[in-house]
Amino acid sequence: MKKRVDINQIKQFKPMRKAMNFQEAIIESNRCLLCEDAPCSQACPAGTDPGKFIRQIKFQNYKGAARTIRNNNIMGSSCAHICPTEKLCELGCSAKELNHTIDISGLQQFAINYGIENKLEPMIKSKENMGKIAVIGAGPAGLSCASELAKLDYDVTIYEKDSEAGGVLRWNIPNFRLPVEMIENDLKNIRDLGVKIKCNEDINTKEKANKLLKNNDAVFLATGLNKAFLLSELKDFNNSKSYIDFLRSIQESKKEIKAQIENKIVTIVGGGSVALDCAISAKALGAKRVYVISLEHLSELPAVLEEVELGHLMNIIFKPNTRITSVKSIDNNIIAVKGNEIDWKEENNFSPKNAIEIEDTEFTLKTDLVIQAIGTYPIIKEVFSELETFGKGCIVSKNSLTSHKKIFVAGDLVNGGATAVQAVGEGKKAAIAIDSFVKGGK
Amino acid sequence: MGKASLKVTFCGIEFENPFCLSSSPVGNHAEMCARAFDAGWGGIVYKTLNVDERFKVIMPSPRLNSYNYNGNKFVGLQNAEQISDRTLAENLKDIAELKKNYSTKVLISSIMGFNDDDWAILARESEKAGADMLELNFSCPQMARKDAGHRIGQNYEAVEHFTKIVKENCNLPIIAKMTPNITDMLPVALAAKRGGADAISAINTIRAITDIDIDSLTPMPMIHGKSGITGFSGPAAKPIGMRFVSELYNDKGLNLPISAIGGIETWRDALHFILLGGMNIQVTTAIMRYGYRIIEDMKEGLLDYMNDRDIETIEQICGKAAEKLVDPSEFDIRYQVVSVIDEEKCIGCGQCYISCQDAANQAIIFDLETRKATVDEKRCVGCTLCKHVCPVWDCITYRTVDTLITPHAGRL
């Protein structure tokens, strides 16, 4: 069973759960039924293989467990903290039929910490003779693909536009959920493999892109979704932000953002994990009141149940089945949002177009800051304009291939936005596709 | 209220219930024993006395180490405890005081001598102090001297001789306490009988090593850098205790009442020993872990069991299971079973499949789509390994079949 979340830790942006200690790990791993063809292992998009690493913990092969995680999922330290395990590995856990699900993320964290504390040997450096690959974007997909290619002895360089590697993990996930040391641990393993990460390298011109294509056997594009959707009603006000800007400002300077949030009323728009992270962060920074406005009902929220429960614990005010229709503003500052309750035209369709207004349910919420977390889209097409795109600008791809034979893609840029562990899995698959392309050409 | 009674008569002495403290730290002095009696224990085997003028006991420290399994602590307990380190005079005073205050309870004086005089003195002094019975400690596996404890208990002649000395020096019923650190306990028990023992108690602790510190490369408990092979008790020791008790009970030549000891924690454990021939029950390790209070559940549980089955006395059921033990050569091999898996209860872990694949006759089919296990009856050899590895207690059962098996090939 998962450990209780400690709200005091959240308020300090420190890990929200105490790490599983040795005793707890032994007891928890001994609850595992060590299933045949384990459902947990089947469910992991990155192939982390919890069935195996839990068995290794149970049989006191703790370093082996850390090795399994690292070998299968190069972002395993980060994933151990941020995976929506209740929707993935823990979903089919047989132990829940007996009493309760195994705390897989807790065990994964334990194994990772054990590896760090007991100086797990570094990963073997790439021999770098199979070819040269450029990876654009040091997020989960890029890092995963680069590592797999390094394991296959490619010379891999990652080009990252930001000052630090990690992508969404570093900038868009609050530290109470994902401690920076975990990203650093993953990055250390990646660098040990011989992957070169060049930060502050934005491939933002056609010229730079062409140069990469010319100097490399293949280019892997994993720039994710980097632009937030904004409601037209809320656009361009001084006190209306995207979640990307809000969460990043927390990572950059808690002091500065705290001054803006403390004792203020914050309205979050959206019902996903990111919206909940924003809401919990705002509360942790001392907001007086935090509203979460979502089209979905509480039971329909894309956020995992645990986050919703945490929201309740933090006294966040949920306004489910509602939408914002207009704002009251003074001098380009929103002073209140106005909205109404909605119902769905047809069931199980949570698109805004399927929402209908319910009469006489109008409300006005006084608010000092609005944060929107209603989704993101990519801005990449200007540079790689020849690539075929669809929908909000995602790249058309099958098996990581694109309309350009030397360009491969994966992660959010293709799937439209999913979990980090999904991006890791896709990055691994892309590496195989790249390997077979390069070998085929030689 | 049912008609069942927990009263037993053991060596002519009436016990209000058969549950006793065995000779150990749980019955170290009068104040502790008084609390045990108050909690409801029927009798106490007081911590072993010796003639302290000849041998001063000093306890090693640390002297305990628990045997842990799968995150469960205290599956067993290893101890390097010695006999009483209090003076004989103090202990005799306590025995006298306890007998004065608890006249209906049974107090058994456990004694250990190192020569004829010791045994004689301890027998006489215990009787004088008012003890109801004596238990001769022929079995402590970690005595700090080499001429005592289980080494005596492995020597038939010494056991017979010292029992005889005790018999000649007092009129109390005598229990001889056996060591399990021997291939066959019977010759020792018979020697005690020849010496005049009225009953046998078994088992004392099993010589064992429970753990090794893998950094200092030292077994546990680590006593200033050294350790020893010392007595092991608790739930993990129970199967071995049950074996010895049943062997004592089933021997026609011995025919002495048995005080049963070995990892007893619950009424069910106690009942197991009764069914194997114990008329009296002794407990220490469970009290070390849970305290005297567990007597309530032992008494209540055993009474309910008896009342639910219209059993009125413990004597009625004593040894009933021991009678069903036969030599493996006498098993009826025409009786064959196959496993039956309850599909409703199956939670789809596949443990039965793995075990049957790697350790039995590959008779379980595990459907990866439905995650349900089924038995291929043509291959099932009825070993029931699956039933025992299944995490759902009542999911896998078995039923009898008519066909015979051929080795390694499943059923014909």
Image (tube, coloured by chain):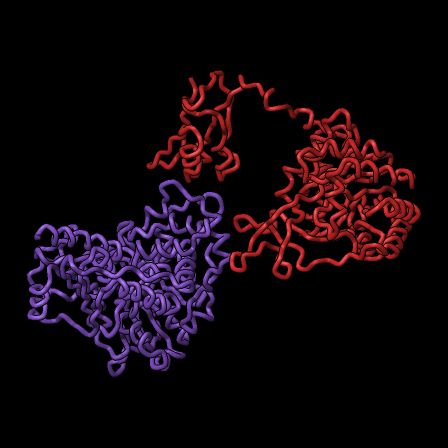
Residue A8, percent across and down?
47, 71
Residue B39, percent across and down?
78, 50
At x 73% / y 53%, what residue is drawn?
B144
At x 81% / y 38%, what residue is drawn?
B175
Q: Quadrant of residue B163?
A: top right
Q: Is residue A377 left or right of residue B257?
A: left
Q: Quadrant of residue B244?
A: top right
The quadrant of the picture occupied by the C terminus of chain B is top left
Name of the residue lying farthest toward the right: B128
Taking B170 as reference, is A410 above or below it? below
Q: Is residue B391 left or right of residue A292?
A: right
Residue B273, percent across and down?
70, 35
Q: Which chain is purple?
A: A
Q: Is residue B215 left or right of residue B130?
A: left
Whether residue A352 appears in this view of the structure is no
The quadrant of the picture occupied by the N terminus of chain B is top right
Q: Nearer the viewer, residue A329 or A119?
A: A119
The color chain B is rendered in: red
